[in-house]
Amino acid sequence: MYLELNHIRKSFRDKPVVQDLCLGLDRGGLLCILGSSGCGKTTTLHMIGGFLSPDAGQILLDGEDITASPPERRPVSTVFQSYSLFPHMTVLENVIYGLKFRGVKRGPAREKGRRYLEMVGLAEYANARVYEISGGQQQRVALARALIVEPKLCLLDEPFSNLDAALRFRMRDELKGLQQELGMTMGFGTHDQEEALHLADRVAIMDQGCLVQEG
């Protein structure tokens, strides 16, 4: 398995939130973690991304143990529900933000940024401010920013929950097409069963911190 979660546990104030979780995902696959609010899916994604440390267990990515690695040292990108874009930056500046930490010079970074904006259909908005574009466009900016650093794994936590129904359906198709085009390995958290079945190669259903079904 490309991504392996081995007996992961996490509690907050002695309340178990993730209990003895074992999950795996092949390279290039898309795993949806499905469950209602409070089931442990966001906590699981945050442990994979490095924003939370598990109390026990091991996380392996491409054969490397990343359990104790900080987020900036992991080959993992995360798209949060709130998108977490920088309002004082242009769309292009947001997309290329992570490249400066990888030593990419400004010229090549901007060139690469424009390619990724074209990929998500936002080339004409490169110089716009984030607050000047719609919610769906902001979601695409967040996705381009996550993908441009070419992570081994991209995590998305309820990324479409702030969008209206019609746009949500369209973004699902666009995400799936982009994931297949890039051969990107993705983990996706959602409470929407239809969304999970539409997007995923594998679905893991969680309830009260436990994995109840996978396939």
Image: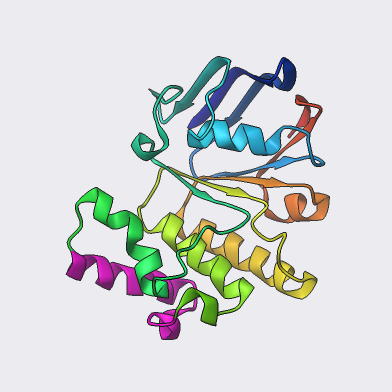
> Relative to the observer, which residue lies in front, 167 or 31?
167
Residue 159 drawn at (x, y percent): 64, 57
| Residue 53 visible in rendering | yes
Residue 164 drawn at (x, y percent): 76, 71
| Residue 1 visible in rendering | no
Quarter of image, res 83: bottom right
Query: Which quarter of the rendering shows the C terminus?
Result: top right
Q: Residue at x 56, y 15 (%)?
A: 57
Residue 7 drawn at (x, y percent): 62, 15
Is residue 110 rendered magenta in the image? yes
Q: Residue at x 35, y 53 (%)?
A: 149
Quarter of image, res 211: top right
What is the basis of the colouring in this image?
rainbow
Q: Is residue 27 above or below residue 82?
A: above
Say how many tags the image has: 0
> Relative to the observer, which residue lies in front, 54 or 66?
54
Q: Seen from this angle, which residue lies furthest bottom?
A: 124
Q: Which residues are magenta?
A: 106-128
Residue 131 drawn at (x, y percent): 53, 76
Magenta region, main secondary structure: helix
Q: Is residue 7 above or below residue 50?
A: above
* Residue 35 located left or right of residue 139: right
> Relative to the observer, which residue lies in front, 75 or 101?
101
